[in-house]
């Protein structure tokens, strides 16, 4: 590290030299960092390579899941979703106790009871947590994927955002193979209700799914504002929920 004594004070990088301001003046140092080739081949960075590979496997799993739910996610806005899902999948890959270090994969972790528990109750919209929005009891049929909400009263059992006049409820049944990327997504018929005090039994039954992957049951609530007889997505879906209620 050298001290810059001249009259011209420089901050930045030039010809492999980095100029910067410190507490005691301006300094120069050679450009630092570890070369990509060294990280790739040096035995000292074996753990770094292993961690990077597992990070990549988790990122790929998150992308596969998001793409599988694209039909639902297009109306649910949350810019933090990729990073939050990534953190969850990094925990799930730790449940892979059969693969060697560096190859632990969320796809394997999700085949374990512990991995399924970690993904269950995941909210795809951090700004609309299902447990904070829906105050009604519901049951889930893990065989058919059906969700039943008896005597549902939107006016008292929803914490609806300001301006919402209607809510649409829909369930999803997903079988997803994270390794082959083969998926089967089935959606129930949507049930649209005015946000009033009239009770009604709501049953959301998607078609059966097939496949050898991980099966998930999801619930989405979408809020609308009616104007002149037309319903519009409230704030472009910022208040819509999408929640994994079961991982089978």
Image (cartoon, grey):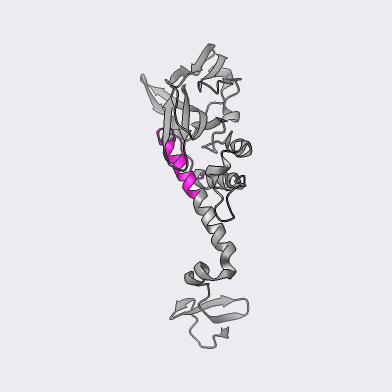
Q: Where is residue 59 shown, x and y percent of the image?
A: 49, 49
Indicate left or right for 35 with 24 as reference: left
| Residue 122 lies within the magenta run | no
Pick the residue in front: 235 or 209. 209
Quadrant of the image containing the N terminus: bottom right
| Residue 66 lies within the magenta run | yes
Looking at the image, can residue 139 be seen?
yes
Q: Residue furthest bottom?
A: 6
Pick the residue in front: 52 or 82. 52
Residue beneath the point at 55% across and 36% down: 123
Specify start and end residues of the magenta stretch as a single range.
59-80
Q: Is residue 118 above or below residue 30?
A: above
Q: Where is residue 247 shown, x and y percent of the image?
A: 56, 32
User: Residue 2 lies in what quarter of the image?
Assistant: bottom right
Q: Is residue 209 above or below residue 98?
A: above
Quadrant of the image containing the C terminus: top right
Indicate left or right for 145 with 137 as reference: left
Residue beneath the point at 51% across and 45% down: 80
Residue beneath the point at 47% across and 48% down: 60
Looking at the image, can residue 162 be seen?
no
Q: Where is residue 229 shown, x and y percent of the image?
A: 36, 19
Residue beneath the point at 49% across and 28% down: 220
Indicate left or right for 61 with 133 as reference: left
Q: Is residue 107 above or below residue 242?
A: below
């Amino acid at each position: 590290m050298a001290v810059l004594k001249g009259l011209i004070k420089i901050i930045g990088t030039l010809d492999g030299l980095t100029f910067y301001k410190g507490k005691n003046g301006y300094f120069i140092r050679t450009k630092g960092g570890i070369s990509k080739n060294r990280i790739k081949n040096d035995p000292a960075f074996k753990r770094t390579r292993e961690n990077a590979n597992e990070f990549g496997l988790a990122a790929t799993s998150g992308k596969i899941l998001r793409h599988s739910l694209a039909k639902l996610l297009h109306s649910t806005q949350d810019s933090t979703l990729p990073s939050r899902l990534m953190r969850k999948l990094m925990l799930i890959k730790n449940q892979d106790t059969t693969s060697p270090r560096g190859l632990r994969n969320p796809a394997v972790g999700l085949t374990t009871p512990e991995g399924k528990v970690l993904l269950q109750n995941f909210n795809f919209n951090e700004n609309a947590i299902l447990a904070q929005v829906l105050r009604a009891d519901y049951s889930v049929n893990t065989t058919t994927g059906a969700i039943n909400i008896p005597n549902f009263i939107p006016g008292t059992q929803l914490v609806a955002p300001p301006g919402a006049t209607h809510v649409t409820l829909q369930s999803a049944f997903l079988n997803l193979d994270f390794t082959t990327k083969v998926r089967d997504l089935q959606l129930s018929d949507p049930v649209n209700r005015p946000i009033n005090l009239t009770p009604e039994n709501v049953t959301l039954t998607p078609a059966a799914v097939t496949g050898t992957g991980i099966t998930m049951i999801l619930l989405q609530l979408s809020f609308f504002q009616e104007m002149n007889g037309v319903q519009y997505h409230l704030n472009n879906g910022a208040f819509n929920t999408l929640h994994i209620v079961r991982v089978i």
